[in-house]
Image: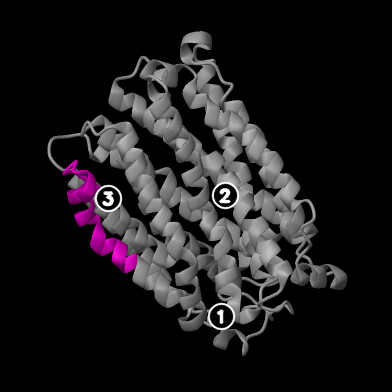
């Protein structure tokens, strides 16, 4: 297989405009992921009893995680919808439209009455709004990474493209920091009654701030060149599926490990530790937040290594590290010891971020500019369906029994090995290779 990234844009590495664009990308992505993560935290802590009260505690948690998974199923659809817009009409409209849709849906979740008030309509509305959240977030990633990747100088593309990759960590910390503060300040009854809704309502103010920041974002040089030449794809999704289906499946399978490990640590472990092990909710939130903070801090450092040594070696190393760490992670989590649980969570997220730090540059480089917004985003979000949508549900079911949940470790190790195999079949896209390449996609 031969990879063919596009020619580098003309921006200089120290350009103030590059820093401004990367900051806009980071902030907007952080807000969108805040919207998405605040639902995951609520699903782990309160949504089961409030919206599925007739279920047993385990079944209620499974049902809440089921609505959580709907957001992941919607993400490839959102990436196809917004990818079409991005490849036909520009990356900039994607940045604004996806943020607006996700923000409105998130605020609305905070307004849905419980099952006790409106019956079956409550979980139905929850499901619909979660689907809309997923549509918006599915479009966000493609627009945000292309904003940085297509403006960035070739030798620093990995670094600048890591800014939106820090967005999930920032969004998670923001969502859970607010939840942690409310959890500590309110009684159990107050938190279950109205406190859990406050982070959803706050999403409206954050969305307005993000829209203001992105209002003056410039279109990328590569899309401007396509538009001036009249070379936009008429039906980008059809072209990607018809001509590059193998690349699409490989990127989706490769990305699944990052989603699986991240949501195991940040969502399933929260429910498992507080429900099964009796760990204090505030303590467990603090442990997970510490692990996510460290993940965010090392992301740009690893991205620089990707610029120097190539994206694919780090992706292979990250997938292998995840496969090796899943059994220690489960063992450490099951101790219920705060220090050991922290070590387990930190180790898991550091393993996955080896891969996650560089995919913001890697996936766009695998696709030609005219198909890039659709191809890279759909592939990325297919990984979310495989690794993110199913993992909390599967892990919760596998952990239903006495003793440590070794089934969870087996499942995660299997996902890691699948991703490792997919990355092994993908080409590298380091800058030295990029200079000798044309502008067609990597795999036909």
Q: Residues within 10 Å of mark 1 (few under 14, many from 20)?
A: many
Q: Measuring from the top left, give residue 148's x and y in whole percent.
A: 65, 66
Q: Quadrant of residue 53?
A: top left
Find numbered disc 3 in the image and state the secondary structure of the residue it sits on.
Answer: helix
Which badge, 3 or 1, comes first in the chain's sequence?
Answer: 1
Query: Which residue is disc 3 drawn over?
Result: 342
Residue name at image x 55 percent, y 72 percent: 158
Q: CA distance from mark 3 to mark 1?
A: 39 Å
User: Depth-wise, is mark 3 or mark 1 nearer the camera?
Assistant: 3
Image-based side of 415 in relation to 209, left or right = left
Image-based side of 168 in relation to 22, left or right = left
Span shown in magenta: 319-342
Q: Measuring from the top left, give residue 225's x and y in whole percent.
A: 81, 73
Find numbered disc 2 in the image and state the secondary structure of the residue it sits on.
Answer: helix
> Is most of the magenta stretch helix, strand or loop?
helix
> Against 16, is 373 above or below?
above
Quadrant that contains the C terminus: bottom right
Q: Quadrant of residue 15?
A: bottom right
Q: Measuring from the top left, give residue 109's x and y in whole percent.
A: 57, 27
Q: Measuring from the top left, give residue 65's x and y in whole percent.
A: 40, 34
Q: CA distance from mark 2 to mark 3?
A: 23 Å
Image-based side of 146 in relation to 336, left or right = right
> Against 222, is 262 above or below?
above
Query: Which residue is disc 1 drawn over?
Result: 3
Is 321 in the magenta? Answer: yes
Mark 3 in CB contact with mark 1 (< 8 angstroms)? no
Residue name at image x 66 percent, y 77 percent: 13
In the picture, the disc for residue 30 is: 2
Residue 10 seen anywhere in this rendered image of the structure? yes
Is 333 in the magenta? Answer: yes
Q: CA distance from mark 1 to mark 2?
A: 30 Å
Which badge, 2 or 3, comes first in the chain's sequence?
Answer: 2
């Amino acid at each position: 297989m031969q990879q063919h990234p596009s020619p580098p844009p003309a921006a200089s590495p120290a350009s103030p405009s590059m820093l401004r664009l990367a900051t806009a990308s980071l902030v907007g992505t952080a807000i969108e992921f805040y919207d998405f993560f605040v639902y995951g935290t609520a699903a782990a802590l309160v949504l089961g009893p409030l919206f599925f009260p007739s279920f047993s505690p385990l079944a209620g948690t499974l049902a809440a995680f089921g609505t959580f998974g709907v957001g992941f199923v919607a993400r490839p659809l959102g990436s196809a919808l917004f990818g079409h817009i991005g490849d036909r009409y520009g990356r900039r409209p994607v940045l604004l439209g996806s943020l607006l849709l996700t923000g409105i849906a998130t605020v609305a979740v905070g307004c849905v009455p419980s099952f006790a008030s409106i019956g079956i309509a409550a979980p139905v509305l929850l499901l619909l709004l979660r689907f809309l959240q997923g549509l918006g977030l599915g479009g966000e990633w493609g627009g945000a990474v292309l904003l940085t990747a297509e403006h960035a100088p070739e030798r620093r593309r990995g670094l600048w493209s890591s800014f939106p990759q820090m967005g999930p960590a920032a969004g998670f910390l923001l969502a859970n920091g607010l939840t942690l503060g409310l959890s500590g300040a309110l009684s159990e009854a107050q938190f279950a009654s109205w406190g859990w809704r406050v982070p959803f309502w706050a999403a409206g103010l954050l969305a307005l701030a993000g829209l203001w920041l992105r209002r003056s974002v410039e279109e990328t040089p590569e899309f401007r060149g396509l538009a001036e030449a009249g070379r936009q794809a008429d039906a980008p999704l059809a072209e990607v599926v018809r001509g590059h289906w193998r690349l699409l499946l490989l990127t989706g399978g490769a990305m699944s490990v990052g989603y699986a490990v991240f949501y195991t640590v940040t969502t399933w472990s929260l429910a498992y530790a507080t429900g099964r092990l009796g760990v204090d909710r505030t303590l467990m939130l603090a442990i997970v937040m510490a692990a996510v903070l460290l993940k965010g801090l090392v992301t740009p450092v690893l991205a620089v290594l990707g610029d120097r040594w190539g994206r694919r070696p780090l992706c292979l190393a990250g997938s292998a590290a995840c496969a090796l760490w899943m059994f220690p992670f489960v063992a450490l989590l099951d101790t219920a010891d705060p220090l050991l649980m922290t070590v387990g969570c930190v180790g898991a997220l550091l393993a996955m971020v080896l891969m996650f730090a560089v995919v913001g540059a890697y996936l766009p480089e695998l696709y030609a500019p005219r198909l890039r917004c659709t191809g890279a985003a759909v592939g990325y979000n297919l990984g979310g369906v495989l690794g993110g949508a199913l993992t909390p549900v599967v892990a919760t079911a596998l952990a239903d029994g006495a003793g440590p949940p070794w089934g969870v470790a087996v499942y995660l190790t299997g996902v890691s090995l699948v991703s490792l195999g997919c990355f092994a079949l993908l080409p590298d896209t380091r800058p030295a290779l990029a200079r000798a390449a044309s502008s067609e996609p990597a795999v036909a």
